Image (cartoon, rainbow, N blue to C red):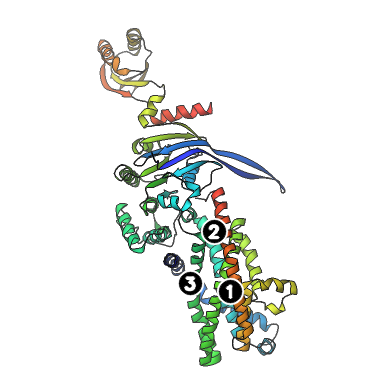
Amino acid sequence: MRYAVEAVRIVKKYVTKKRKGFFKSETEVVEALKGISFKIRYGEIVGLLGPNGAGKTTTIKIVSTLLLPDSGKVFIDGVEAFKNLSYVREKIGIMLTVEKGFFPKLTGRENLIYFGTLYGLERKLLEKRVNYLLDLLELKELGGSDKLYEEFSLGMKARLAFARALLKDPPIILLDEPTLGLDPVSARKIRRIVKDLAHKEGKAVLYTTHNMFEAEIVCDRILLINKGVIVSEGTPEELKNKIPKLKVIRAVLHGGNMEKLSKLISSSLNLKPEIKIVERGLEVKLAIKNPEEILNDLLKIFNLANVDVVSLNIEEPSLEDVFIYFAKGVIE
Amino acid sequence: MLKRFISLVRAEYMFVAAEIIRRKTILFALILWPYIIMAFIVLLGSSMGTMSYFQQKIGANPILFFITGSFLLIVSLIFFDEISSRFWYDEFIGTLPYIMIAPTSKTMLALAMGFPRLIINILVGLSSLIPVYFILKSFPGLVEALIVIALSIFSALTFSTLAIIFSSLVLISGGGWRVLSIIRPLIMLISGVLYPRFLLPLTIKFFTIIFPLANSVEAIQLFLVQEGLTAYSLMLLGLATALALLYAPVSIRSLRIWEHRILIKGAKT
């Protein structure tokens, strides 16, 4: 099977010099990536999820052939990237930062024409493509088509950066935190287009983010990265199932006695509830692996204790719990 | 390949024109620059001797000599200035990664970067040189001005390959404007634009022989003094062309070295 992107044991170290007096300097080596490997299929959105400094941008720069790894290989569309730069660069569309990366004195349209020319698009095709993208990202509507880039809002800048990534209609799209700092409307717009591009047009997307919610709703598969290591991977559901965290039953009750309720639950279900007084009454929290199995008994206990159930939820572990679990695993 | 190059020049022209037209200070500076330089040199020169003394010593009208010199200076350094400062500017505003990732030869792009400013400066030349030549020499002055402009373009083109090498040095050093401001005066000195070659010390004079710009500048200066192209001037122009071709492969290699350094370091975003 030919993968859109295949990274094999990538290592990247950054060497920085620190001045120590006028003549002396000390070199510091930071290992940004410690031999990561992953694959992306066509039609799939793979999220690279990690905190700041985890190695997300370094990964995306290496995959896009903007940064040479110290060791390891990258294959794009089955071809070794750093040995076939021109071929690989034809296949990739990239969005690195939202807030800059365009010429301030050119309009949105002119900027796209400039980069499209640089990417080798024929004039007529380029104009057609630019018009299509300005429409798709609603930049014409927002006035970004003929407005100077220096007058753009952050949302418009992000839309333009995304449009540039799609200029060549590339089969592989690399997006580095594409919705960072954006208003909800612009962020939602970009997420929807990304999903359409992958699921309807079969494009491969590598999507870095540190936003758990975004990773969960956009990505088909997630790679959790921390300190240059992929600590776990899978679909959001698979990742949640990988951690031993229990589900939580949270009930808000009206009336009743806190101590009596606690004793009843402890004796009948052999569980230690966490009960506290909240605005609407009592809040009962129970951590358990299979909450569905005790739900009926629990309702009977509430009835026995003479309390009214205001609300009852079963909470599953979030992607955030998953991330914290794996991140701590690496630290410890 | 030519079609691709032309489309790159068009894209670069759009960028340069927007920068000039949408920044009024740059537009005014561009139009006034040859006059400012000429006025500065003539005023400085007047404090050292009269205009007739200059004419007697050099054999050319000082106003014509220096307005031509200042125009030549701007035109001939275009490729060096544009390439060194443009890639640096791209790094500053964050466009460099998108330029690096483009499946376009960076040497072709570097050459395309110089052309729009060259075209604009030719227009400036037409507006600054032609009136002065016409006032001082009447109709024959018009033809002379056009020949000077053509020779200046030729001189810029023959310097383009070495300019790419110098620009690569500036870019590889990572020093930006600081390195640029050291190399630029050296180029001015060796080129003979402000300080005629025959007045230079022998050791520096030797270096100027392998410097295409110095040969074409001397040919232009001889044209002004002798009011025509001699066999020696043509030989100098031929030498400049040969040197430009000789430096071409080195210029491609030097830009590749810079590109490789960016790949190791990673283009700033």
- Rendered image: mark on residue B241: 1
Q: Secondary structure at mark 1?
A: helix
Mark 2 and mark 3 lie on one chain; the one further toward the N terminus is: 3
Q: Secondary structure at mark 3?
A: helix
Discs 1 and 2 share one subunit? yes
Depth check: give the residue in front, A315 or A222: A222
* Gap between marks 2 and 3 measured at Cα: 21 Å
Mark 3 and mark 1 lie on one chain; the one further toward the N terminus is: 3
Q: Mark 2, residues whose alpha carbon is within 10 Å: few (<14), some, or many (≥20)?
A: some
Depth check: give the residue in front, B183 or A151: B183
Residue positioned 54% across, 63% down in the render: B83
- Look at the image and tell me whether residue B74 can be seen: no
Q: Quadrant of the N terminus of chain A?
A: top left
Residue at the disc numbered 2: B88
Name the quadrant containing residue A248. top left
- Rendered image: mark on residue A81: none
Residue positioned 55% across, 91% down in the render: B137
> Residue farthest to the front?
A1
- Look at the image and tell me whether residue A56 can be seen: yes
